[in-house]
Amino acid sequence: MTRYHLSNGVWKRYRAVTRTGYGVAYCDTKDADGNRLDHRTGLEGIAAAGGGVVERALVTGGYRYTSVYNNADGTFTAETESKQLIYAADGTQLRARKYREDLAAKLPEKISVTPKFQAILHTGDKEWLALPWKKREGLIEEALDELLEVFESEAEFEGWSIRGQNLGTTRFWKTGEVSIILAQDRLRVRGAHQVADTLLHEVAHSILPARQLHGSRWWNKFAQMKEQVGMSDPVDEAASTKSKEERLAEARLTWPFGGVCLQGHRFYIQHYPKTTLRCNRGVCRDLSPERARIRIGNNTERDLNLKLAPIRR
């Protein structure tokens, strides 16, 4: 088991000068006052000491830093720049999915004081998209205010973006303020369940520190909030039996971008492509890349009459 000592506010692995048998003798390193440094065994020992930052030298040069902090349920998290791992108090690593399921079973009572959010959540996608956008826009803003109040978030709704890259964005300012921005052009073509999921997603970001991003701590909080508001992931049992025409019709209602080639072949995509797309249907297979190029535009009409934007070069 790896042992660490706390030196200058950072936990470091120590290497003893003398060895006894196959083990390593206790480190006798002392601080500036002559006191022996605090020693702990394993990451669980560091967590028991209140957590901290672990510094480890890399073979390629430089150091890797791991943040160890305790969770409210008695577990602790070890977080690096690339991943987060959850451990039990005895140092046993927990599987993230099972941990979230066990955590959901310990949640408090469900929240039932969000009428606007519940109205969105329990509306079918077709009925939701049939509503005028101005009405949907007002419901979304009211539902977001409800969630911010219920979950005691200090964030404020900053407004709507016209060309947002994401469905929503949570901003953390240097002044300590937190704001949420929603993408109008993307949410107006999304179903009710995805809209509700986006609102809860951003509120979860606003509650936790900015550095959490989409780590395990954020996922755990998001799972708790979904359970509290009675939200579950939709299961489409008939997805595997839908015809190509049915899937295309659904894409026209929900996917934000569409495209067409010179031969009239239609396409619907979820994300604006970073590279030029070409059509491989029918006679387009034998055409040059320029003649088979797919022109992309916003799927704002939600039908076959796409308003195509100029080709981006």
Image: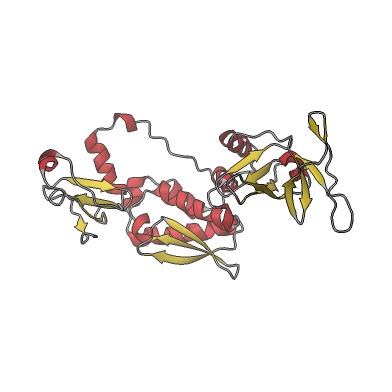
Q: Is residue 150 visible?
A: no
Residue 33, image x, y percentages: 89, 58
Identify whether 231 is placed above or below 181. Answer: above
- From the viewer's side, name the closer residue of 232 and 136: 232
Q: Quadrant of residue 164?
A: bottom left
Q: Which residue extends farthest bottom?
A: 175
Residue 116, image x, y percentages: 48, 55
Quadrant position of the C terminus in the picture:
bottom left
Identify whether 247 is placed above or below 241. Answer: below
- From the viewer's side, name the closer residue of 311 and 39: 39
Q: Residue at x 26, y 47 (%)?
A: 268
Quadrant position of the N terminus in the picture:
top right
Q: Is residue 14 left or right of residue 211?
A: right
Q: Is residue 303 left or right of residue 198?
A: left
Q: Residue at x 24, y 33 (%)?
A: 243
Q: Is residue 25 visible?
A: yes
Q: Is residue 293 left or right of residue 172?
A: left
Identify whether 50 is placed above or below 157. Answer: above
- From the viewer's side, name the closer residue of 165 and 188: 165
Looking at the rendered structure, the number of numbered marks drawn on it comes to 0
Q: Which residue extends farthest right?
A: 34
Q: Is residue 205 left or right of residue 305?
A: right
Residue 139, image x, y percentages: 43, 58
Q: How is the image coloured?
A: secondary structure
Residue 105, image x, y percentages: 62, 36
